[in-house]
Amino acid sequence: MNENAPATFQLPEQMSTLAPQVDWIYYFIFWLSVVMFVGIVSAMVFFAWKYRERPGHKAEPTGHNMTLEIGWTIAPVFVLVFMFHKGFEGYLNLSVAPANSMIVKVNAKQWAWEFVYPNGGSSDELHVPVHQPIKLVMDSADVIHSFYVPALRVKRDVVPGMFSMVWFEATHVGHDDIFCAEYCGGRSTGPGGTELPYAPSDDPLHPYIAGQATGHWSMHSMLYVESKEDFDKFLKSIGDPCDAYVNAGKDCPLKVAADQGAKLAQSKGCVACHTTTGARLVGPSWKGIFGKQESTDKGGVSVDEAYIKESILDPNAKIVTGYQGVMPTFRGQISDAELDEITAYIKSLKD
Ligand code: HEC
Ligand SMILES: [Cu+2]
């Protein structure tokens, strides 16, 4: 099932390991519908002709046929359960990223995509290495968006106030469009019209948001699948995300957030149980944990934004192997902005 087909009359090119599975169930449903349609319409036409009104024939009511009724109720149930099973299998596959996935953070907002890579750099187009599972951790700054790449057969909603996750592994070098598949508003321009939610920014990292996009239709980007070498070159080219700010003579917001997070770790008392040096206290050290695999009582997890948030608000959801579930919850005592700052701090604690 891993042969990737080029575009067909009905479907675009396959570019991910998942695509053949999605297309299989698509064609199964399509051909089942064709067979049912031809069968039902033929029978209908045949019987309409067979029992047509003609001299010498009287209409005879047929009554109830129990065997038939039960037959055409049970048979479709099997087909539906099979289709549900296939669909659910695909959904689960899409939801559970392999342990060796590279994490890319996706920020959606009206009307742009931003992709943040493991080295901290960001871009408005998604570059990924071929044959490498990519886990997208997605978040929206405003309304619901939906990340959609046809050739990957991947589509998932991006919802404000939570992280949604999807993963894929590209099978060959190439490119495809990234669309927003959720109607996410537009700019009203007429006299007295509503204001654009984002004023043009002088943020050197996000010049593309600078007021040139005007609606859902413009929330378009590109996916580039590259060889490992090309991808490494790309990563180098976006470099340290702070460079652009430093060059513009400004404070780097990431650094400011991380510094703020360091202060919070003190004032909220995290440092009583966590070090940043690699040394173990009551809880594990934060040094170098971001992006790593952590083993917990619920199995292996990769440490990403969503896991850190969960660890702080719901510490007992997953307990790190070798530690006690003694961390208190900070739900209600820590704002969303503070969570982001602590996350930025933990991210900055590289090995
Ligand atoms: C009373 C001690 C204690 C305090 C205070 C505490 N923690 Fe923890 N924390 C733990 C322990 C023990 C674990 C490991 C067990 C678990 O997963 O719950 C842990 C786990 C974590 C993890 C997951 C680490 C990993 O390696 O997977 C994060 C992230 C975390 N804490 C963040 C925080 C933050 C942020 C604060 C302050 C707002 C904080 N903790 C305060 C004891 C504490
Ligand atoms: Cu959108």
Image (spheres, rainbow, N blue to C red):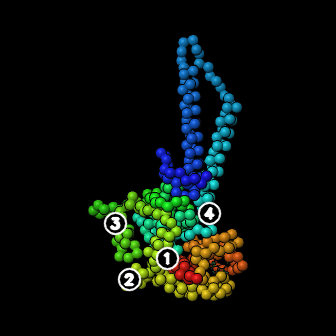
Decide: is 32 above or below 223. above
Q: What amino acid does circle 4 point to? A: Val
Decide: is 130 above or below 266. above
- Mark 4 / mark 1, whichever is N-terminal: 4
Q: Secondary structure at mark 3?
A: loop
How far apart are labels 2 and 1 at the CA level?
17 Å
Is there any visible trace of residue 166 in the rendered image? no
- Mark 2 / mark 4, whichever is N-terminal: 4
Question: Which residue bears the numbered disc 2?
Answer: 247
Decide: is 137 above or below 6. below
Mark 2 Cα-neighbour bin, 10 Å: few <14, some 14–19, many ≥20 = few
In the displayed structure image, the side of residue 24 where residue 190 appears, left or right = left
| Circle 3 or circle 2, nearest the eye | 2
How far apart are labels 4 and 1 at the CA level?
24 Å
Circle number at residue 212: 3
In the current view of this chain or complex, which residue is farthest to the left?
191
Question: Which residue bears the numbered disc 1?
Answer: 120
Circle number at residue 96: 4
Are circles 4 and 1 on residues that touch, CB within 8 Å? no
| Circle 2 or circle 4, nearest the eye | 2
Q: Residue at x 47, y 72 (%)?
A: 233
Are circles 3 and 4 on residues that touch, CB within 8 Å? no
How far apart are labels 3 and 4 at the CA level?
36 Å
| Circle 4 or circle 1, nearest the eye | 1
Q: Residue at x 56, y 45 (%)?
A: 27
How far apart are labels 3 and 1 at the CA level?
25 Å
- Mark 2 / mark 1, whichever is N-terminal: 1
Q: What amino acid does circle 2 point to? A: Asn
